[in-house]
Image (cartoon, rainbow, N blue to C red):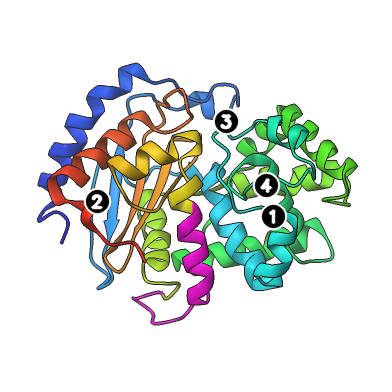
């Protein structure tokens, strides 16, 4: 096991918490700006069903960009990789997650990967269904299966707050629509996308999703194969190359695990064949990642040699 006790994990949380004074909550989304900068919690879920944790793990957080991994898995199952990657690329950008720069300079205005906002909007556009309600319902049902928790839902306050402040995502959507990458009403797409980002859960649920990805799409507790191995592999690869915004390269070298962050301060980690991690620390660095969450993962990686895990 990674840690022998919750007390051991709590000591690392207290050490990492010292970084929160250097971060800032995502107050450009008013609902997220209400978070306590000094919060930090973590859950680690093992394949045998056991879990250790530290901090206020019951506090619910919205997935934000962590949802991009889950929507990608769903559309890969809906359409297959060839269809999906004709419409969104596979390459890291090195640019901020909400940048429009590469769309303007590429010969074909196809988003470079599904983890940037432009790419995530294209992925959300591909979710099957005859209405926004049906499409969101399918995504939410998938999330409930991954967490084995039928009560997981979304926060209407966060969704509304994001929709009201989504002008940059509107611009990205109109740009890719102009170039034929999407063909639906932009406001409908943003309604779906903001609900997707507002799906909320606690760290235990987040770690449970992480362990499913870590175990190649199989829920080790129920024994159900929730996604094909190949889909889980593709998603984990994107988590390594693009999962931590434009700090992904440094994160891969320093910490070395597949992970995805969100501007709510969440981080989901999936250490192949070993465990899933769920973290909440709303104080963000200048890249949009949880500053104390990354420090906590650095401490775990250093103490337990996570970087020696062979990614497959």
Q: Secondary structure at mark 1?
A: helix
Identify the residue position indicated by label 1 in the image: 123
Count residues near mark 3 (Cα–Cα under 10 Å), then give few for <14, some for 14-19, many for 20+: some
From the top left corner, tell me how far across and down residue 18 is, in percent.
Answer: 23, 23
Q: Secondary structure at mark 3?
A: loop
- Residue at image x 76%, y 64%? 134
Residue 7 lies left or right of residue 188; in this view the side is left
Q: Are marks 2 and 4 in contact (CB under 8 Å)?
A: no
Q: Is residue 150 visible?
A: no
**Location of residue 84 by image quarter:** bottom right
Quarter holding the C terminus is bottom left
Q: Are marks 4 and 3 in contact (CB under 8 Å)?
A: no
Identify the residue position indicated by label 3 in the image: 96
Q: Is residue 61 visible?
A: yes
Q: Are marks 1 and 3 in contact (CB under 8 Å)?
A: no
**Is 138 above or below relative to 119?**
below
The numbered mark at residue 119 is 4
Q: CA distance from mark 2 to mark 4?
A: 28 Å
Identify the residue position indicated by label 2 in the image: 307
Q: Nearer the viewer, mark 1 or mark 2?
A: 2
Q: CA distance from mark 1 to mark 2?
A: 30 Å
Q: Secondary structure at mark 2?
A: helix
Q: CA distance from mark 4 to mark 1?
A: 6 Å
């Amino acid at each position: 096991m990674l840690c022998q006790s919750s007390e051991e994990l709590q000591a690392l949380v207290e050490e990492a918490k010292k970084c929160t004074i250097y971060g800032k909550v995502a107050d450009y989304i008013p609902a997220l700006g209400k978070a306590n900068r000094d919060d930090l919690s973590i859950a680690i879920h093992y394949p045998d069903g056991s879990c250790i944790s530290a901090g206020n793990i019951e506090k619910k957080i919205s997935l934000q960009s962590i949802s991009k991994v889950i929507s990608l898995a769903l559309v890969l199952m809906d359409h297959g990789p060839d269809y999906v990657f004709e419409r969104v690329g596979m390459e890291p950008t090195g640019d901020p997650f909400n940048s429009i720069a590469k769309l303007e300079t590429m010969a074909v205005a196809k988003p470079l990967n599904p983890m940037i906002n432009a790419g995530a909007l294209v992925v959300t556009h591909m979710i099957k269904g005859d209405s926004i309600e049906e499409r969101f319902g399918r995504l939410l049902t998938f999330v409930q299966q991954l967490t084995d928790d039928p009560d997981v839902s979304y926060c209407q306050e966060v969704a509304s707050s994001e929709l009201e402040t989504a002008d940059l995502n509107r611009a990205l959507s109109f740009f890719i629509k102009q170039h034929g990458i999407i063909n639906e009403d932009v406001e409908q797409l943003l309604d779906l996308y903001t609900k997707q980002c507002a799906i909320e859960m606690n760290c235990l649920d987040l770690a449970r999703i992480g362990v499913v990805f870590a175990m190649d799409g199989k829920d080790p507790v129920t024994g159900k194969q929730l996604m094909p191995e190949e889909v889980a592999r593709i998603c984990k690869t994107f988590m390594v190359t693009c999962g931590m915004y434009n700090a992904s390269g440094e994160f891969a070298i320093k910490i070395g695990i597949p992970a995805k962050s969100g501007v709510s301060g969440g981080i989901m980690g999936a250490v192949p064949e070993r465990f899933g991690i769920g973290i909440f620390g709303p104080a963000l660095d200048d890249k949009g990642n949880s500053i104390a969450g990354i420090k906590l993962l650095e401490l775990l990686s250093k103490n337990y040699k996570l970087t020696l895990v062979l990614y497959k």
